[in-house]
Amino acid sequence: MKFGEVPVEEAVGALAAHSVRSGETVVRKGTLISSEIALRLKRAGVEFIIAARFESGDIAENEAALRLAQALAGANIVVEAPFTGRSNLHAEVPGVLLIDGEAVNHLNAVDEAMTVATLPAYKPVVAGEMVGTVKIIPYAIPEILLQKGIAEAGIGALRVAPYVRRSVGVVSTILPGLKPSVIGKTLAALARRLEPAGATIVFDRRAPHEAAALAQQLADQGHSDAQLVVIFGASAIADRRDVIPSAIEMAGGRVEHFGMPVDPGNLLLIGSIADKPVIGAPGCARSPKENGFDWILHRLLAGIPVTRADIMSLGVGGLLMEIVSRPQPREGGESESEE
């Protein structure tokens, strides 16, 4: 594509790169300059304009944006019609956004003329939510450049994993001094978290904060209709040998990982029982505010496996908020509800 300042009479057949205004004569950015428009500009005293002229092999910005967006769109992603060199991608269903970050980075490195921006990977999204946007910077790009970008993007770098687990079982442990209202508020907060996924609590039990008693309730969960089990401890998990991990193993389950480099959310545990995922919720999960529990909960609701390696990769960006009550970790004690 040729781009630059040219005499008005030589701009016929090119696009106005910028809006031009002279008296009552206005030519908007992107307008195709015809002989009539050139004459009007000349009569208005405009001698030169900055214009863009396509060359052989150039692909117009809208077509280029659309083709690139279509290459990026994977399962459950819809592509919006392009406009001004931009094509947006939207979630077709509620779920969790999955992104091939390497493909997106490689595409953005091809040339400054092509850009792709997305929401963060693993973000829960609703149907219709914009998850990415493709923008072609100039008015046109060479076909060969577009093909290179498409090759780097691969196929389906953006997709949405739909929510597949709709039933959740809950076991809350009890200690003297724990108010029943705390458990009620916790269940209400969980129910609100489940709403976007269309999931509900189908099993709600209490047990003393003892390994044997909790193990019995967890064994019952293994035979329930729940597809995911959440344990809210009256006291936060402090060690792999603590009550909750011990109870999971006593019930025939398995502890996959304890601890998470996300704050709030450090004291989260993941495991399984009867082939169902189990979350030992951190104390901060009682709060409606976003914390590490949300990240793991939504992945599991969408059927996305969560491994130890997955959790340990969450440190960068894992500081979700400053906890004013403890500006220095462990200074002067700390509230279990924050972890």
Image (cartoon, rainbow, N blue to C red):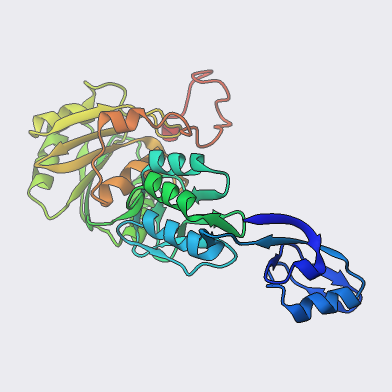
Q: Quadrant of residue 6?
A: bottom right
The image shows residue 280, relative to residue 90, as above or below, that is above
Residue under the image location 68 percent in, 72 percent down: 32
Counting from the top left corner in percent of width and height, residue 27 is at: 78, 73
Q: Quadrant of residue 95?
A: bottom left
Q: Nearer the viewer, residue 34 or 200?
A: 34
Residue under the image location 55 percent in, 55 percent down: 141
Can residue 285 be seen in this snapshot? Answer: no
What is the count of numbered marks? 0
Counting from the top left corner in percent of width and height, residue 34 is at: 72, 77
Q: Nearer the viewer, residue 177 or 260?
A: 260
Can residue 297 be seen in this snapshot? Answer: yes
**Which quadrant of the figure contains the N terminus?**
bottom right
The image shows residue 93, relative to residue 320, as above or below, that is below
The image shows residue 312, relative to residue 278, as above or below, that is above
Of all residues, the one furthest to the top in this rendering is 331
Residue under the image location 58 percent in, 59 percent down: 55
Q: Quadrant of residue 26?
A: bottom right
Counting from the top left corner in percent of width and height, residue 78 is at: 38, 65
Counting from the top left corner in percent of width and height, residue 205 is at: 20, 48
